[in-house]
Image: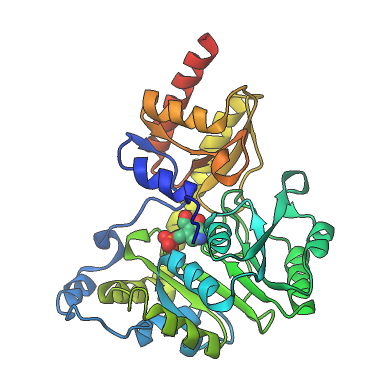
Amino acid sequence: MQLETFELERTQSLWENTVEYNLTETGIHPLTLRELLPAPELERLYDIPIGYGQTNGSIELREAVSALYPGADRDNVLVTNGSIEANFIALWTLLEPEDELVVMLPNYMQIWGLGRAFGMKVKPFYLREELGWQPDLDELGKLVTSKTKMIAVCNPNNPTGAVLTDEAMSEIVKLAQGVNAWLYADEIYRGAELKGDETPTFWGRYDKAIVAGGLSKAYALPGLRIGWLVGPDDEISDFWARRDYVSITTAILSNRVATLALQPELRQKILERNRKMLRENLAMLTEWVVEHDPLFKFRPPQAGGMTFLSYEMDMNSTELVTRLRKERSTFIVAGDSFGMDGRVRIGIGSEQDYLQAGLKRIDELLVDITAC
Ligand SMILES: Cc1ncc(COP(=O)(O)O)c(C=O)c1O
């Protein structure tokens, strides 16, 4: 198997802990257990035997997850080690080598890279900035064929922060239905909307829709490593059987904390805390972009802790972020990681002082660059 480097994840893994300002994250500044839970709940955690637990996820957690998806019950849920494991298992289970996989780009590049490694025929369809980061539906219509086995989307999208319109969602469902393909939606940024309602889920729109979600982004709890798959009972059983070969289970303590975080009142509190941070940080970043006009431009995200900026500078994006990392100990993501040079992704989920200091470091580098 030929595996291409997962550039986005690999560069982050290499450098995110070595810099002073890491602005590569797309989630929100993580919560501590103390911030999250009242003392009596913390106290109860001490007494949980640290066993394997229920390997498809505790019943209470699967029930809490299924409550987020109308019509679903606990048998429609497999709890996974982050949504990254959800994506891996879904792709590995549902498709065979040579199958045609139509994938939204730009994207978190896992499904794109894995599909290629598994020998699938990966056909990208693009979100277009001139269409407000929506897909060109005619173009997508031409790409989907009778051989298409899956259409995979990321909604809200990483890195653009765009949310599909209702029209686009309906058309994607129609196209998948028309060729009897799986519709796979990575919805990990759902709940991190900057304004308006929660992004609608693809779950329930089509009997072959499978969605992934998790606590790493909108809930600011990435270290719990809790993600999930929601799908038809039979496929959820198949996913579980495959997962036996991968990681057996998810951590029992994480299952308990995740269950508590998903109880309606606490869930609401977490999401409100996070959306407030994102709104305030987006306002600050927007000001920064305006100050740098016309060097940087961007379409504000609708959801998620990230902004995807284009820049007017005669410099490759990898070179720009490498200089920023080496010379100013500040880390952002190169557009190259998404196959889109001339852009950078800057996270807006950190604490405000930290983000501000990171942006100042970018300013310092820009002064150096323009002085040359
Ligand atoms: C779209 C998308 N899916 C999945 C993941 C993996 O997240 P997790 O930490 O839940 O495994 C990420 C991480 O950045 C992501 O952006």
Residue at 61%, 62% in the rendered image? 155
Say whether residue 226 is left or right of residue 68: left
Residue 242, visible in the rendered structure: yes
| Residue 245, quarter of picture | bottom left
Percent of width and height locating residue 265: 41, 72
Between 307 and 312, the one lying in front of the other is: 312
Q: Residue furthest front?
A: 1
* Residue at screen point 15% across, 79% down: 47
Is 166 drawn above or below residue 9 in the view shown?
below
188 on left or right of 148: left
Q: Residue 122: horizontal and vertical position, in percent?
A: 65, 61
* Residue 30 vertical position relative to residue 341 in the rendered view, above or below: below
**Point 47% across, 14% down: residue:** 368
Residue 201 can be seen in this image: no
On the image, the x and y values in percent for residue 161 come to 60, 51
Q: Quadrant of residue 15?
A: top left
Q: How is the image coloured?
A: rainbow
Please state which of residues 358 and 236 is positioned toward the viewer in this rendering.
236
Q: How many marks?
A: 0
* 39 relative to 35 in the view: left or right: left
Q: Residue furthest top?
A: 371
Q: Is residue 98 above or below residue 322?
A: below
Which residue is at 47% across, 50% downward?
5
In this rendering, the answer to whether 316 lies above or below 370 is below
Q: In the image shown, does 156 or 152 lie closer to the viewer?
A: 152
Percent coordinates x, y for residue 33 in the rendering: 26, 62
